[in-house]
Structures are given as structure tokens and as C-alpha cells.
Image: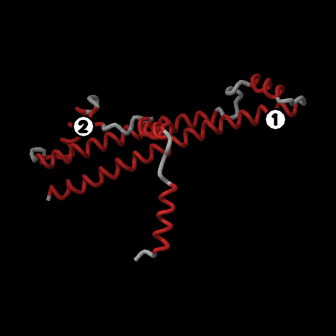
Amino acid sequence: MISPRRIASNRRNAQQSTGPRTREGKDRSARNARRHGLATDISFDPDFGPQAEALACAIAGPRRTDPWVMQAARLVALDELDLMRIRQIRSGLLAKLVQALDTAGEAAEPHSMDLVRTALRAGLRGQKDIIGFVRVQQQAHAIARMSAILMELLAIERYERRAMSRRKRILRKLETLRE
């Protein structure tokens, strides 16, 4: 049995975590799932229809005439294609991360002369101070870029877990239908 003290604590915590309150925050939160396009149901994508049907027939095997088995096989096929799509996006993000790591020491972004001008405007006059400022700013820019990529990778992980969980659940049901 849960103590009254614990119940009161849970209620206080729930009051603090109610999500975004402003219209801006709610709109931003509503767009989170659309960033990668992974929130959309893959069954509505006409490009994946023939692939899903072929994969479903392979999964159903000789029981493809059974409508229940075939429906479960279609769901498994859609989840498998969804996982492939998620992993392809993750692969692209990992390639971006590797590229960001490779270029982290280069003076490509932001441009060194712009940073020198900023340092001069800030009152830095010594050569060592200006060079130090430029390096710190470039590193901060590279770290921010890598951090953004890592955050995207974390978001994609949630979609992958969801698809794997759905696939696993349906495969269990499919196994019971085969028996």
C-alpha cells in the first residue's frame, strides 16, 4: 500500500511536470515527431507497399492463404521496413557526426577572420589572446554541432525501440496463429 506521504509527493511532482504551457511551447512540442518523418505510418507510403507485401508473403510462408496470418505478417513486414528506414536515418546521422569530428579542428566554420573581428571588437589586443579566442569559439561551434547530432540520435532511438517492440509483439501473436 502506498503511504499518504508518497501520494502527496507524487501529486506535487505531477503538478510540476505538465508539459509546455505557452502556445509556442505547445507548437514546438507538436512538431517534434515530424522532424525526421518517423512518426508517419509507413503503410501510407506508396513506395513501401510492394516491398511490404513481398516481405509479408515471405514471412507468412505456406500459411499465406490464412487471412489472420497474412495480416500479422503484413504488420511485421511494415515494422521491419520501418526499422530499416530508421537505421538508414541513423546511419546518415552517424556519418554527419564522423564528419563533424573530422572537421572539428579545422577553421572552416565559423570563419577565422570573422572571429578575429569579434575578438577585436571585444577589446582583445594581444595576438595570443585573439588566437585563443578564435580556437575556443571554433571548438564551441564544433561541440554545438556534434551535440545537436547526438540529440537527434537519441530521438531516433525512441522510434527504433517502438518499432522493435511492435514487431516483437506481433511475432509472438503470429507464432500462436501458426500452432
**Residue visible at 13% across and 49% down?**
68
Q: Which of the two labelled residues, at mark 1 and mark 2, occupies the earlier sequence position? A: 2
In the rendered view, would you say 37 is above or below 179?
above
Q: Label 1: which residue? A: 132
Q: Quadrant of the N terminus?
A: bottom left
Residue 162 in the figure: left or right of residue 93? left
Q: Nearer the viewer, residue 29 or 120?
A: 29
Residue 51 in the figure: left or right of residue 116? left
**Amino acid bearing label 1:** Gly
**Amino acid bearing label 2:** Ala
Q: Between label 1 and label 2, give the one nearer the viewer.
A: 1
* Residue 77, position as x, y percentages in the image: 26, 42
Residue 105 found in image quarter? top right
Scheme of colours in the image: secondary structure
Q: Label 2: which residue? A: 52
**Residue visible at 82% across and 31% down?**
131
Residue 51 in the figure: left or right of residue 133? left
* Residue 15, position as x, y percentages in the image: 49, 57
Residue 12 in the figure: left or right of residue 169? right
**Residue visible at 25% across and 53% down?**
171
Q: Nearer the viewer, residue 92 or 163?
A: 163
In the rendered view, would you say 84 is above or below 15?
above
Q: Are marks 1 and 2 in contact (CB under 8 Å)?
A: no
Secondary structure of the residue carrying tag 1 is helix
* Residue 148, position as x, y percentages in the image: 57, 39
**Residue visible at 44% across and 36% down?**
31
Instruction: Classify 10 Å Cα crowding around label 1: few (below 14), some (14-19), many (20 and above).
Output: few
Q: CA distance from mark 1 to mark 2?
A: 56 Å
Secondary structure of the residue carrying tag 2 is helix
Residue at the right extreme of this rendering: 126
Q: Quadrant of the C terminus?
A: bottom left
